[in-house]
């Protein structure tokens, strides 16, 4: 019985390590206005409200679930560990959570996409002129990145 428990613990530990290694870490610059090191292959989010998800080749590789609201400015996401040679599909989704009222249900996303250390695409969108009170996916943007 002891061996089964130990084997189960080792298996769970191995699973947690694999999950932790799969999600790229984010780096947050100290303050607004300070420069940050652009990723070779990655995304710099300048604004996120409410929740962002990043998919590489249909695999979720990063989400704002682990961030606090105060940490959602200038988030750098390194995509290199999840890219393969050739054409990669990068899909970025912005999800809106319910607000207290229709007038208080704002959302926005603003990011730059980097390839070989240079910005090659960007996107900025918000709810400024939209009166949509529903929650869920508000932005679903797909980019192609070739290595």
Image (tube, rainbow, N blue to C red):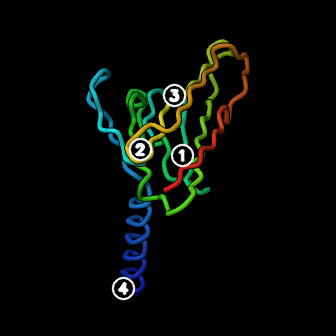
Q: Are marks 4 and 1 in contact (CB under 8 Å)?
A: no
Label 1 sits on a secondary structure element that is strand
- Which dot marks residue 77? 2
- Disc 3/disc 2 C-alpha distance (Å): 13 Å
Label 3 sits on a secondary structure element that is strand
Instruction: Write down the quadrant of residue 13 in the picture.
Output: bottom left
Mark 4 or mark 1, which is nearer to you? 1
Q: Are marks 4 and 2 in contact (CB under 8 Å)?
A: no
Q: Residues within 10 Å of mark 2 (few under 14, many from 20)?
A: many
Residue 32 horizontal side relative to residue 134, left or right: left
- 74, 21: nearer the viewer: 74
- Which dot marks residue 142? none
Which residue, given by chain and number where applicable, does mark 3 sit on? 110
- Disc 2/disc 1 C-alpha distance (Å): 9 Å
Which residue, given by chain and number where applicable, does mark 1 sit on? 54
Residue 4 horizontal side relative to residue 122, left or right: left
Mark 4 or mark 2, which is nearer to you? 2
């Amino acid at each position: 019985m002891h061996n089964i428990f130990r084997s189960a613990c080792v298996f769970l530990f191995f699973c947690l390590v694999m999950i932790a290694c799969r999600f790229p870490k984010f780096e947050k610059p100290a303050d607004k206005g300070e420069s940050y090191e652009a990723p070779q292959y990655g995304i710099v989010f300048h604004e996120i409200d409410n929740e962002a998800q990043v998919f590489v080749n249909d695999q979720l590789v990063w989400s704002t679930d682990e961030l606090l609201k105060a940490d959602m400015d200038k988030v750098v996401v390194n995509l290199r560990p999840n890219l393969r040679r050739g054409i990669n599909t990068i899909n970025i989704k912005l999800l809106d959570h319910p607000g207290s009222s229709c007038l208080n249900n704002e959302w926005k996303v603003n990011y730059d996409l980097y390839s070989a250390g240079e910005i090659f695409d960007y996107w900025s969108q918000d709810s400024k002129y939209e009166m949509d009170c529903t929650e869920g996916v508000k932005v679903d943007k797909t980019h192609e990145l070739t290595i």
